[in-house]
Image: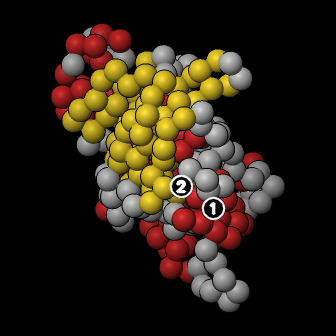
Amino acid sequence: MLACNDLTVAYGPIEVLHGVSLDVAKGECVALLGSNGAGKTTLLRTLSGLKKPRAGAVTFDGGTIDGMSAEGRVRAGLAHAPERRRIFPGLTVLENLEVATAAWRRFGASIAEDMERVFGLFPRLRERRGQYGWSLSGGEQQMLAVGRALMSRPKALLLDEPSLGLAPLIAEEVCDRLAAIGKLGVAILLVEQNTAMALSVASRAYLLEHGTIVLQGPASEMADHPRIREAYLGV
C-alpha cells in the first residue's frame, strides 16, 4: 500500500535520511523505531508530501506519488496524524472531524457513517462532541487527532508519537484502537517512542538510526533482539 525506495532527504547541506527503504501492506501496522533525532518525523513528513526528498521514490496504492502535493496525497488516501496532535482548539470535536472530510466530500454528501465509525473506535469523542478542542484532555485530543485523520477516508495512516505526553492507561487505550483501524483495511506506519508498546501492536518493525535503517523484521523477533532490548527496552 505504501513504500519508499532509497529515500534521501536533507535540510540544506545536512543530509538527514540516507537511502531509506520500507513498505507497509494493506491493513498492516508497521512500527518505525529509533531515538530522538534519528529522522523518524522527517520520514513521515516526506511520505506525506510536507518535505521534498533529494533522491528516491515514494509509491502509494500501486503508483508513484513523487510529484504529488501534500493535499493531493490526502485526497489519494494518505493521512498524517502529526506529533503533538495539532487539532483546532477553537473548533468543537464535531467541527474538527468534519474539517477532514474536505478531502473527499461533495456537496450534500453524508458523513454520518464516517462519524459513527470514529465514535465506535473512540466512544469518548461522542460524549465530548460539542466541546471545544482546547477543553479536551491530552488523551482525548490524541483520540481526536487520530479520528480526524480517519475522517479523510485514508488507505494508509502515518501516526507520529500517539502516546506522547499521555498517562500510561490512556496511551494504551489509544494504541489498542490501532488493531481495530487495521481491520478496516487501513495500513499504519507508527512512529512511537514507547518501543514496548509499538512492538506489541505492530506486526513488523524497522529501526532507524542516524537516518539509516539498521534493522528490520517481525515485531516479535525485534523485541527479542539484543540491540533493541539494550538500547530501547532498557533490558
User: Which residue is pictured at 43% across the width and 42% down the height?
Assistant: 4
Vertical arrangement, residue 7 with respect to residue 153, above or below: above
**Above/below status of 128 relative to 134:** below
Name which quarter of the figure residue 185 lies in.
Answer: bottom left
Among numbered discs 2 and 1, the one appearing first in the sequence? 2
Q: Residue at x 81, y 55 (%)?
A: 90
Q: What amino acid type should be assigned to the residue bearing mark 2?
A: Ile
Q: Which residue is mark 1?
A: 72
What kind of element bears circle 2? loop
Mark 2 = which residue? 65
Dot 1 falls on a residue whose secondary structure is: helix
Q: Position of residue 110 (x, y in %)?
A: 60, 85
Mark 2–mark 1 CB contact (< 8 Å):
yes
Q: Nearer the viewer, residue 186 or 21?
A: 21
Crowd around label 1: few <14 · some 14–19 · many ≥20 (10 Å): some
The answer to whether 114 appears left or right of 129 in the picture is: left
